[in-house]
Image (cartoon, helix red, strand yellow):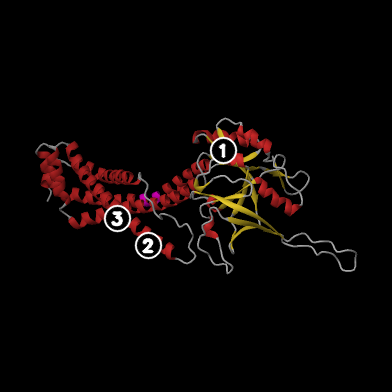
């Protein structure tokens, strides 16, 4: 029997009981559609989470903070090591490290300009380290000098007027802004009748800063950060506490470490952890989350796979009914010289056709379903009051491996379901089959 005969015979047979065929294919379509939709849910979660992790920083960067251990002899925790100048030098000497950026956080302050107020994240960095680290400038300089400030890309967007209403983003390059710090409480200048009054410390500290640069959009918290020199930040600390910290001895808030390539991140991270410091990187988080999300996708896809396996029962029933209805026809084929192997091949080809058609239609229906869900949900998020400023780019996302996997699984389920009816047809006795009505 030639290949063309196989196909012609199979095509003619599948069209005999059209309603039964339609119901059987529909069961496969439902199973395939469920696999597409369920794995797309996991794929959408994975894609959004991974994009957020990638946006948190370059994959060749490491964030270093002081480790904590229990306080001996009492409650609480104490740092395991200080992020001081000595630590910065030690990390700089590690193989694979190309730049280290010490950061000093300044909280409880704001920036004012022409009656507008903003409260960005304010970080002080040493000028020479910031230059080596290489911030991407959009306008002006990427590194501040003393008395200057470099703004993240979206800092101009977070200025408010006196009524706490969002103001249009001002053009700040070349302008002078004020750094304003206030004390929460100011002691009284002295008790009346008890000697000369003691002058109260000033309740407010102001410092003029020239805006010399605006960085490119990076999609991280750096977009909402104002960068000063460490010396300007120390001026504010000294006003607050009456003492000027020494960064070479005392601890920075955090360190950023940049490696030459992503392949060196793991080794550098382990070397920093060996110094009793906490070292995290977007790359390590990315790998951990990716593994967890693949497990989630497999679990969600298993729900659709169950429906696909159940559809195999329909395929088995359809093929078994075909065997019973075509008993005499099978006897004639065997009488004309068809071998058992050829009879099995005919029925398995018919089952394969049902599985493949169901898989292809299911993929199409699943794709349409994901597109409709994405469109509806994203529109709802965009129009919702109080929606997040950065809504997800997609809700459902179908990984590239899903379509071929659905086709193979549907074909495999259909073939396994049709195997018993095919073997039963091949084992029919020719004489009994010819006598069948």
Badge 3: residue crowd in 10 Å (few <14, some 14–19, many ≥20): some
Membership of 302 in magenta stretch: yes
Q: Is residue 211 left or right of residue 251?
A: left
Q: Mark 3 falls on what kind of element?
A: helix
Disc with the residue nearer the chain's start (3 vs 2) = 3
Residue 104 image point, x, y percent: 65, 47
Disc with the residue nearer the chain's start (3 vs 1) = 1
Task: Determine contact: label 3, label 2, CB under 8 Å.
Answer: no
Disc with the residue nearer the chain's start (1 vs 2) = 1
Residue 76 image point, x, y percent: 73, 49
Q: Which residue is drawn at 79% across and 62% down?
A: 187
Residue 132: assigned label: 1
Name the residue at the left extreme: 336
Is 382 or 6 nearer to us in this picture?
A: 382
Q: How far apart are marks 3 and 1 (CA)?
A: 53 Å
Membership of 112 in magenta stretch: no
Q: Residue at x 10, y 39 (%)?
A: 335
Q: How far apart are marks 1 and 2 (CA)?
A: 46 Å
Mark yes or no: residue 71 visible: yes
Residue 365: assigned label: 3
Q: Of circles 1 and 2, which is in front?
A: 1
Span highlighted in magenta in the image: 300-305
Q: Of circles 3 and 1, which is in front?
A: 1
State the residue position of label 2: 376
Q: Mark 1 falls on what kind of element?
A: helix
Residue 331: assigned label: none
């Amino acid at each position: 029997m030639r290949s063309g005969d196989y196909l012609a015979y199979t095509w003619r047979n599948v069209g005999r009981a059209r309603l039964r065929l339609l119901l059987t294919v529909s069961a496969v379509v439902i199973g395939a559609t469920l696999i597409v939709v369920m794995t797309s849910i996991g794929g959408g979660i994975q894609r959004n989470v991974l994009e957020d992790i990638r946006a948190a920083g370059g994959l060749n960067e490491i964030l270093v903070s002081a480790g904590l251990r229990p306080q001996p002899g009492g409650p609480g925790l104490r740092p395991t090591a200080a992020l001081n100048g000595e630590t910065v030098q030690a990390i700089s000497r590690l193989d694979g490290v190309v730049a280290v950026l010490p950061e000093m956080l300044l909280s409880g302050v704001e920036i004012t300009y022409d009656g507008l107020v903003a409260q960005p994240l304010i970080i002080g960095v040493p000028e020479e380290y910031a230059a080596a680290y290489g911030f991407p400038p959009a306008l002006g300089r990427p590194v501040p000098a003393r008395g200057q400030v470099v703004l993240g890309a979206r800092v101009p967007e977070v200025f408010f007027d006196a009524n706490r209403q969002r103001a249009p983003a001002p053009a700040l390059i070349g302008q002078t802004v004020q750094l304003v710090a206030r004390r929460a409480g100011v002691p009284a200048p002295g008790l009346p009748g008890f000697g000369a009054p003691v002058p109260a410390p000033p309740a407010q500290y102001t410092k003029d800063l020239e805006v010399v640069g605006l960085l490119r959009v990076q999609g991280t918290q750096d977009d909402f950060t104002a960068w000063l020199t460490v010396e300007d930040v120390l001026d504010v600390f000294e006003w607050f506490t009456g003492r000027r910290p020494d960064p070479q001895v005392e601890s920075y808030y955090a360190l950023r470490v940049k490696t030459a390539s992503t392949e060196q991140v793991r080794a550098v991270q382990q070397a920093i952890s060996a110094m009793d410091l906490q070292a995290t990187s977007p790359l390590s988080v990315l790998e951990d989350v990716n593994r967890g999300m693949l497990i989630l996708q497999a679990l969600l896809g298993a729900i659709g796979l169950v429906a696909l396996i159940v559809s195999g029962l329909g395929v088995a029933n359809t093929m078994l009914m075909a065997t019973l209805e075509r008993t005499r026809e099978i006897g004639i084929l065997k009488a004309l010289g068809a071998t058992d192997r050829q009879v099995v091949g005919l029925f398995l080809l018919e089952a394969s056709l049902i599985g493949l058609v169901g898989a292809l239609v299911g993929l199409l229906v699943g794709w349409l379903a994901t597109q409709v869900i994405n469109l509806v949900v994203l529109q709802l998020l965009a129009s919702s009051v109080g929606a997040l400023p950065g809504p997800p780019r997609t809700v459902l996302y179908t990984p590239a491996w899903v379509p071929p996997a659905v086709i193979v699984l549907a074909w495999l389920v259909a073939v396994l379901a049709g195997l018993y009816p095919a073997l039963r047809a091949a084992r029919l006795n020719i004489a009994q089959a010819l006598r069948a009505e």
